[in-house]
Each structure stands twice: as C-alpha cells, then as structure tokens.
Amino acid sequence: MITKRREKTKDLMLYDFLVHRMDFSIKDRQIYEMIKQGYEGEKRFDQLNGEMNGNSFILQDLLFTHNNTTYQIDSLIITTDTIFLLEIKNYKGDFIYENDRLVKMPNTEIIQPLHQLHRSESLFRNMMLGFKYTLPIKSLVIFIHPHFTLYQAPVKIPFVLPTQVQ
C-alpha cells in the first residue's frame, strides 16, 4: 500500500515552467535533463511498486533531518520483518565498476551512488534507533533504466540491475 506518493520537486516544477519560456544555457539544460531523467526513473519504479502484493507500506520521496543533517530517501518499503531503503538511479548507457568507482564509458566518473546510500542508511538507522525501532534495514541501489549496462560489478555490492528489478 502506497502511503506517501512522490511529487515533483520544486526545482523540476520551476524548470518545467521555464523551459518553454526562455532559452536555457547548455549547463542549465543539462541540469534540467538530469533532474527530469531522475524523476522519470523514480516514477517508473513507483509504477512497479504499484503492482506489489502483500502487507507492506511504501513511502516515496522522503526528506528527513536528523542530528542537524538533512537527507533524502527515494523509496522506503516497510514489510513485517524488514525496511528496504532504496536509492533509484535512471542512468542510461554502458558503465564499468572498478576500484570502488562507477565510470560511464568511455571515461566519465559518476558520483558513487553507494556513498549516498550508505550516508542515508546510517542517518536513517540512527533516527530509527532513537524511536526504538529495531527492524533490519536493507539498502539497495536500483538501476531502473532498461538501457543501463554495468560491467564488473561485484556480486556482493547492493546493486539491483534493470533485469533484476521485477
């Protein structure tokens, strides 16, 4: 059951409003496309969640502040025995994982999504301990775009590839 739905961010709404009313610089166009692509990937994942059966709560697009630190969680799925903290990525193209780095081929390093995931998980876990909740938390990076390929990913890395999302 979806208990909190995803909404467009203020930045995306502003860009959507302005895109047809002014000429964007190349940098602004890239920022807009990146924000828009991320939102579309999250919505695609939300559609799959809508097909889930069972007794679970789905919370989308959460923003928390804990210990004077603000962090965002793309999706949180709470089941009877586990909390799934999910970071959704809508990357497209060929990527390689090497030396704890994610590189878009041929040679563009991407900010490592595992770092964001670990930060969110740590802050969320501490917040939940403050509330005396002790359900185990399982954190995953979900690559949702059907044209995403990742080479050399270790099996123990918490990545879910497009072919595994279902």
Image (tube, rainbow, N blue to C red):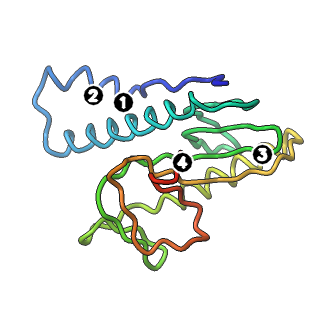
Residue marked by disc 1: 11
Which amino acid, mark 3? Answer: Thr
- The first of marks 4 and 3 along the sequence is 3
Label 4: which secondary element = strand
Q: In the rendered structure, are the residues bearing label 4 and label 1 in contact, judged by CB atoms less than 8 Å apart?
A: no
Distance (Cα) linking label 2 and label 4: 23 Å
The type of residue carrying mark 1 is Asp
* Residue found 12% across the figure and 25% down from its top: 22
| Foreground tag (2 vs 3) | 3
* Residue that mark 2 sits on: 15
Q: Sequence-wise, which precedes: disc 4 or disc 1? A: 1
Kindly indicate whether the residue at mark 2 contacts the one at mark 1 (C-beta within 8 angstroms). yes
Coordinates of residue 160 in the picture (x, y in percent) = 53, 56
**What is the quadrant of the N terminus in the image?**
top right
Q: Say which of marks 4 and 3 sits in front.
A: 3
Mark pair 4, 3: CA separation: 16 Å
Identify the secondary structure beneath mark 3.
loop
Residue for badge 3: 82
Q: Earlier in the sequence, mark 2 or mark 4?
A: 2
Q: Is residue 55 left or right of residue 103?
A: right
Residue type (three-letter) at the residue carrying disc 4: Glu
Judge the density around disc 2: few (<14), some (14-19), many (≥20) Cα neighbours within 10 Å: many
Residue 69 coordinates in the image, percent (x, y):
63, 45
Distance between mark 1 and mark 2 Cα atoms? 6 Å
Q: Residue at x 44, y 32 (%)?
A: 43
Between the residue at mark 3 and the residue at mark 1, the CA separation in whole angstroms equals 32 Å
